[in-house]
């Protein structure tokens, strides 16, 4: 008999495409519409903890729109699932965030969003502040594949510095405000093969 997992590492909700007018994986997989059935299947399979994307890119449009997130979080709570919330999954930036992690307002606005999130959902104790920060920054600012499509070592180091500051600032806020906090910091580790 195969053991059932108690933890699911994540439901990917990454934004796909250009900064404005793009969609995300929750849309392409229809999870946004059928989340109750999807989450119900996880519970049926014995999953208790699941990392879920919280669509910061859709919520922060100058004013916070919590409509879908309220329904989603309420469903998770009713099902008894423990969410590991993951608001910035890869390059899932709101439309105003032209420079990605290096946008001059990103850290302050994301901090304000996370403070509002903690106040709105005080029962949530597990957080991924930024998903795969080194991997994401590499593709955003070294390889130029993901938004804001910068290239080079200097851009990568500057953006990684911004990412690290943001993670530290928000983690400290969470430590101060969330009793029983669990921080989950996933990233990739890759090694170049020897020639």
Image (cartoon, helix red, strand yellow):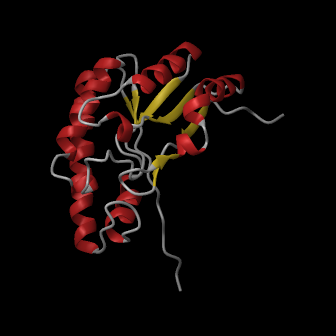
Q: Position of residue 116 (x, y in %)?
A: 26, 25
On screen, residue 74 above or below 60: above
45 lies left or right of 115: right
Q: Is residue 76 visible?
A: yes
Q: Is residue 11 visible?
A: no
Residue at the spot x=48%, y=65% of the render?
Answer: 190
165 lies left or right of 194: left
**Residue sitting farthest toward the bottom:** 195
**Residue sitting farthest toward the front:** 21
Q: Quadrant of residue 166?
A: top left
**Residue sitting farthest toward the top:** 78
Front-most of residues 122 and 108 = 108
Q: How many numbered marks appear?
A: 0
Residue at the spot x=40%, y=50% of the render?
Answer: 21
66 lies left or right of 31: left
On screen, residue 85 above or below 40: below
Q: Position of residue 123 (x, y in %)?
A: 39, 16
Residue at the spot x=34%, y=27% of the render?
Answer: 65
Q: Where does the N terminus fall, quadrant-wise?
A: top right
Front-most of residues 39 and 191 = 39
Residue at the spot x=22%, y=57% of the render?
Answer: 161
Q: Quadrant of residue 147?
A: bottom left
Q: Position of residue 19 (x, y in %)?
A: 36, 54
On screen, residue 57 above or below 137: above
């Amino acid at each position: 008999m195969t053991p059932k997992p108690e933890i699911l590492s994540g439901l990917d909700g990454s934004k796909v495409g250009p900064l404005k007018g793009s969609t995300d994986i929750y849309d392409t997989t229809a999870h946004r519409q059928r989340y109750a059935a999807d989450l119900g299947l996880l519970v049926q399979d014995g999953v208790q903890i699941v990392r879920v994307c919280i669509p910061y890119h859709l919520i922060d449009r100058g004013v916070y729109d919590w409509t879908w997130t309220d329904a989603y979080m309420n469903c998770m709570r009713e099902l008894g699932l423990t969410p590991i919330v993951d608001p910035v999954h890869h390059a899932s930036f709101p439309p105003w965030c032209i420079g990605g992690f290096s946008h001059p307002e990103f850290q302050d606005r994301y901090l304000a969003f996370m403070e509002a999130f903690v106040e709105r959902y005080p029962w949530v104790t597990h957080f991924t502040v930024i998903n795969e920060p080194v991997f994401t920054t590499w593709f955003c600012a070294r390889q130029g594949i993901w938004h804001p499509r910068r290239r080079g070592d200097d851009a990568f180091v500057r953006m990684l510095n911004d990412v690290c500051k943001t993670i530290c600032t928000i983690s400290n806020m969470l430590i101060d405000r969330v009793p029983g906090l669990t921080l989950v910091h996933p990233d990739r580790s890759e090694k170049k093969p020897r020639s």
